[in-house]
Each structure stands twice: as structure tokens, then as C-alpha cells.
Image (tube, rainbow, N blue to C red):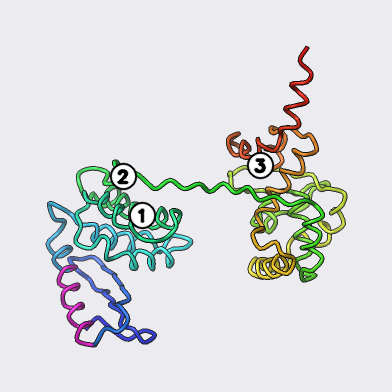
């Protein structure tokens, strides 16, 4: 029997050698299932896995096969592999029994759920990644199963900006351990992850590896020079910074201002002081100019000055 109780719910777990391969699969069964229901599921699911792998790849491979291969061979090497496995298990009802060529039908099924478009996109992306992995690395299927798949469009651009006085209100009530990092974020435009990786070289923040894969130097503003030299490298954890920043912003009524919005506010402050978009992008470390264009609407005064110079 491959089912057992896990936190008051039955869990199916398959971990056996089939046709010379180690096959692993796991699924948390619905709450309220009886031992008999769990046992029936175990027999049915185990038989399906055996039929898929003991007899070799079917002429019409299933998405289940792709997901099993992905969980077994790829997820252990992913940074957030355990989370990906949990989400693939949770979406089992959408793709079980579906052919690899029916990936679009799976996408349509997930899109009908009452969750955000970003969540739908992420969930579909995990299944798409599993199908592509199985096709490219295990020759499952005759063509890329995701070649005709259209992903949900998500607008991730945020337009939340605060001024220096607002930032200081948040920093004032924040725990003293995170207060300097709130100021550093506002005066440097660095992402949280970059702050944690930064070192100091010649009165500049040095970022050896950034999100864009390139090193960069960020000049240190005079208002945070002493704090930077004292608190960089960072001596607290990301969880601590996030926890106490969240608490401080709520106490001051800035619930919708994320830590990353301090970076957007850096861009806003520079543009409002007449700095051009190209320079703003250089400070923030944007390689693609389109990343900086989200701030274009803030530079209307600069554009107006340019128009007035005509003639």
C-alpha cells in the first residue's frame, strides 16, 4: 500500500524501480477521504504508473508522464523545486489522463478558476515546463507540446511611489535593525536582493552579480554614507527585514507600499529632479530601455521644458 496519513489527510506516495528507472510520484488526497477511498486511489494510480513506464512510452504520451519525469529528474535541481512539486500535485485534476497534445485544454481548464491572472500564469507555466522538459530531454512526443500554447497576459507594472518624507515616516517607526536598510533602498534604488549582496568600493555600492547578470556600481548618497559603511554587508536576514518593514508600513498607513516600491520611488525622485530616463535606467541597472519606460509618465515637466525651448 502506497498511501499513509499525513496531517489528518491521506497521501499517495509512489517510489519504486520500474523498467530500470526510479519512479517517484506523490499526491495529497482530498480531505475527508476514507481509508477505502485512499486504497482504491492507490491501486488505480499505481497501475497507471506501471502501465506508462513498464511498457515504455505510449504512442500518445500523457501529461502525467511528463510531470512524473519532471518531478523525478528536474525538480530536485530547482531552487524552489519543492514548491513546484506541491503546485503540480495540486493541479493534478486538470491534466490527469490528458494527452501531451492537449496542453491547451489544460490551460483553458486552469483559466476558469477564480484566482488572479498571475497565479494562473504561474500554474500553467509549471505544467508547460514539465511537458517541454519531457519532450526535449526524454523524447516524449513528436513535437514541442507548448508550441501553440498561449499564456495569460499579466500586467506586473506597479505605479506606487512615495516621497522622502513618507519614507522617513516608515523608517522612524521601524525596528532599529531594519531602519538603515529602508533609507539605503530609497537613496540607492537597489532591490532587496541587491542590498543583501552589496559590498562597498570607493564610496559606491558594488554589485558583483545583479538580476541582469552584469556587475554594477551605485554611488552612495551622502545622506546614507555613514549608514552604508556601518550596515553593509547586511547583518540581518531577509525574513527579518520583510517582517519589520511590513509592520512599519502598516503602522504609518502605507499598506500598499512594498519594499520594492522604494526602488520605484528612487526613480520617481530622480525624474522629478530633472534626471533623464537614460540616466535613471543606468542607476537602476536596466539593460532594456523598456524597463525604464514605465517611469516616462513622470517626466512630463522635463518634456514640457524641452517643448518650450523650440523656437
Left or right of 13 in this view: 244: right
Label of residue 149 in the image = 2
Residue 36 is one of the magenta-drawn residues: yes
Residue 121 is one of the magenta-drawn residues: no
Q: Position of residue 7 (x, y in %)?
A: 39, 85
Label 1 near label 2: C-beta < 8 Å? yes
Residue at horizontal 78 percent and vertical 52 percent from the top: 200
Q: What secondary structure prevails in the magenta region?
A: helix
Give the mark nearest the N terminus, 1 or 3.
1
Residue of label 3: 285
Q: Position of residue 156 (x, y in %)?
A: 53, 48
Left or right of 227 in this view: 148: left
Q: CA distance from mark 3 to mark 2?
A: 32 Å
Q: Secondary structure at mark 1?
A: helix
Q: Quadrant of the C terminus?
A: top right
Q: Secondary structure at mark 3?
A: loop
Residue 81 in which image quadrant: bottom left
Residue furthest toward the top?
Answer: 311
Residue of label 1: 124
Q: Could you tell me how many numbered marks the image carries?
A: 3
Classed neighbour count for the residue bearing mark 3: other residues with Cα under 10 Å, few (<14), some (14–19), many (≥20): many
Q: Position of residue 292 (x, y in %)?
A: 63, 38
Classed neighbour count for the residue bearing mark 1: other residues with Cα under 10 Å, few (<14), some (14–19), many (≥20): many
Q: Secondary structure at mark 2?
A: loop
Q: Position of residue 286 (x, y in %)?
A: 63, 39
Is 232 located above or below residue 30 in the figure?
A: above
Q: CA distance from mark 2 to mark 1?
A: 10 Å
Left or right of 65 in this view: 263: right
Which residues, given as a range, are shown in magenta?
35-49
Q: Quadrant of the N terminus?
A: bottom left
Classed neighbour count for the residue bearing mark 2: other residues with Cα under 10 Å, few (<14), some (14–19), many (≥20): some
Amino acid at each position: 500500500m502506497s498511501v499513509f496519513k499525513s496531517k489528518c489527510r491521506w497521501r499517495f506516495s509512489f517510489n519504486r524501480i520500474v523498467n530500470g528507472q526510479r519512479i517517484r510520484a506523490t499526491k495529497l488526497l482530498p480531505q475527508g477521504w476514507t481509508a477505502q477511498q485512499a486504497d482504491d486511489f492507490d491501486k488505480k494510480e499505481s497501475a497507471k504508473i506501471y502501465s506508462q513506464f513498464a511498457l515504455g512510452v505510449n504512442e500518445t504520451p500523457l501529461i502525467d508522464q511528463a510531470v512524473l519525469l519532471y518531478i523525478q529528474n528536474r525538480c530536485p535541481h530547482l531552487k524552489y523545486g519543492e514548491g513546484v512539486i506541491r503546485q503540480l500535485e495540486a493541479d493534478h485534476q486538470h491534466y490527469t489522463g490528458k494527452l501531451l497534445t492537449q496542453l491547451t485544454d489544460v490551460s483553458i481548464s486552469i483559466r476558469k478558476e477564480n484566482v488572479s491572472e498571475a497565479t494562473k500564469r504561474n500554474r500553467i507555466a509549471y505544467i508547460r515546463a514539465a511537458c517541454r522538459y519531457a519532450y526535449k530531454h526524454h523524447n516524449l512526443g513528436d513535437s514541442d507540446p507548448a508550441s501553440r500554447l498561449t499564456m495569460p497576459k499579466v500586467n506586473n507594472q506597479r505605479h506606487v511611489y512615495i516621497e522622502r518624507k513618507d519614507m522617513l515616516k516608515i523608517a522612524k517607526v521601524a525596528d532599529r535593525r531594519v531602519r538603515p536598510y529602508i533609507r539605503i533602498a530609497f537613496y540607492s534604488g537597489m532591490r532587496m536582493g541587491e542590498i543583501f549582496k552589496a559590498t562597498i568600493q570607493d564610496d559606491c555600492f558594488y554589485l558583483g552579480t545583479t538580476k541582469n547578470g552584469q556587475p554594477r556600481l551605485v554611488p552612495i548618497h551622502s545622506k546614507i554614507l555613514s549608514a552604508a559603511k556601518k550596515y553593509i554587508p547586511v547583518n540581518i536576514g531577509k525574513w527579518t527585514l520583510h517582517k519589520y518593514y511590513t509592520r512599519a508600513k502598516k503602522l504609518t498607513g502605507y499598506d500598499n507600499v512594498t519594499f520594492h516600491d522604494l526602488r520605484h520611488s528612487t526613480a520617481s525622485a530622480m525624474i522629478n529632479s530633472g534626471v533623464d530616463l537614460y540616466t535613471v535606467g543606468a542607476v537602476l541597472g536596466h539593460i532594456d530601455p523598456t524597463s525604464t519606460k514605465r517611469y516616462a509618465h513622470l517626466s512630463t515637466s522635463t518634456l514640457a521644458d524641452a517643448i518650450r525651448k523650440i523656437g
